[in-house]
Image (cartoon, rainbow, N blue to C red):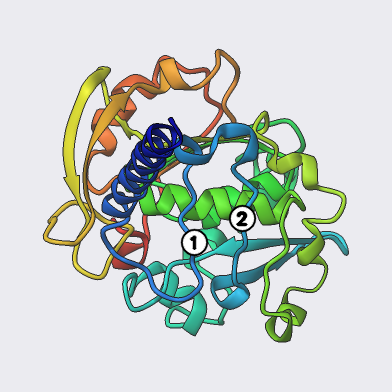
Amino acid sequence: KMKRLFGWTLICTSICIMFRNSVLDREIRIRKESLTGSKKLISRESIGIDNFCHFEISSKFIVAMQYNSLASNESFKYALSVHDPVFDTIVSNGILNGIFGLKGKYPSVEEIHLICEYGSRSSYGYFADCSLGKTFVEVGSAIGMVSMYAANRGMRVYAFDPLRPNIDRMHESICVNSGQICPGDKSNVSKLGSVCNGSVGKEAFYSRHNFNIHWNLVGARTDQEGIEVQSEPGNLAATMRGGGSVRARVSVVTLDDAVAAQPVELVLLTCQGHELDVRSRIGLLRLRFDAHLTTGAGGGA
C-alpha cells in the first residue's frame, strides 16, 4: 500500500510540474523578444488579476519621468518600465539614452504635455482639458509613456496596444506607480526618489478602475478571431512592416465597445497608417478634441 501511495504521489507531482512548465512555456513564447536582465514576465492570466503586482523588478529598466508645469510649481513625476534597449532600439533606447533629446524624455510625451499645459487657457483658444477625471484614449500606446503621463494628471486612461511585451511593461509601470512594488537594486533606486513609494499622492490614478489596459487592435469592426501582427526588427512600437521577433494573433475592438459611454477629452492615435480606419468609429464618441499625433520612427508611425 505504501508503495502504491508513493507511486500515486509521484505521478501527481509529475503532472503538477508538467502543468506548471506548460504555463511557463506559453508565457515565454509570448515574450519572444527574450528580454534579458532582471526583467520578470508579468502575466495576469498566469498569476491572477488580483495578485499581478506580486513580483520583484529590477530598477535597471525603470526610468523616472518628470515634466514640470509651465503655469505652476506642480511636477508630473512617474515611473516608466522600459524594454532592454537591445531589443527595443527606438522608444526604450530613446528614453534611456536620450537619442531624441534629454534622457528620461520622449517627443510624444512632450507634445501631450504642451497640449495639456496650454490647451485649456482661454488666451490660446480652447484645445483640451487634461484635468482630474477627464478621459484620455491612446491607440498604439507602446510601453505607455504618454498614458502614464496622462494618468499622473488625474485623467482616466484607456491604452491599446497589440504587442504583449508592451502590455507587460505597462502593468509593471502601474505596479510601481501605485506603490504596490518597489524596484530592487538599491544602488540604483536613488534615481527614482519618491517614485519608489509610488507616485506620491497619486497612487489611485494608477488603479485598475482609472487605468484601463487593452491588449487589442482598434478598428472599425469587432473581430474576435483577430489579426496576425508582428513587430518590426528592433522596434517594439511598430508592426507595419513586420519582420521582428514578437508575433501574435490579436483581436480587434472598436472604441465604442471598449471605452465606456462617456465624453472623451483627448485621443492620441499612433497606429501606423490605420488612423482613418480607427477614426471611422471614433466619430460615434462624444469628443471635444481628436488628437492625431505621430512622431515618425520614434513613435512607431
Is mark 1 in CB contact (under 8 Å) with mark 2? yes
Residue 47 position, x and y percent, is 52, 40
Q: Which residue is mark 1?
A: 40
For the N terminus, the quadrant is top left
Q: Is residue 270 visible?
A: no
Callout 1, which amino acid? Lys
Q: Which quarter of the picture shows residue 129?
A: top right
Please indicate whether residue 215 sits to the left or right of residue 70 in the image: left
Residue farthest front in this picture: 1
Residue 90 position, x and y percent, is 35, 71
Callout 2, which amino acid? Phe
Q: Mark number for residue 13?
A: none
Q: Residues within 10 Å of mark 1 (few under 14, many from 20)?
A: some
* Residue drawn at point x = 74 percent, y = 48 percent: 178
Please indicate whether residue 296 sits to the left or right of residue 191 in the image: left
Q: How far apart are labels 1 and 2 at the CA level?
A: 8 Å
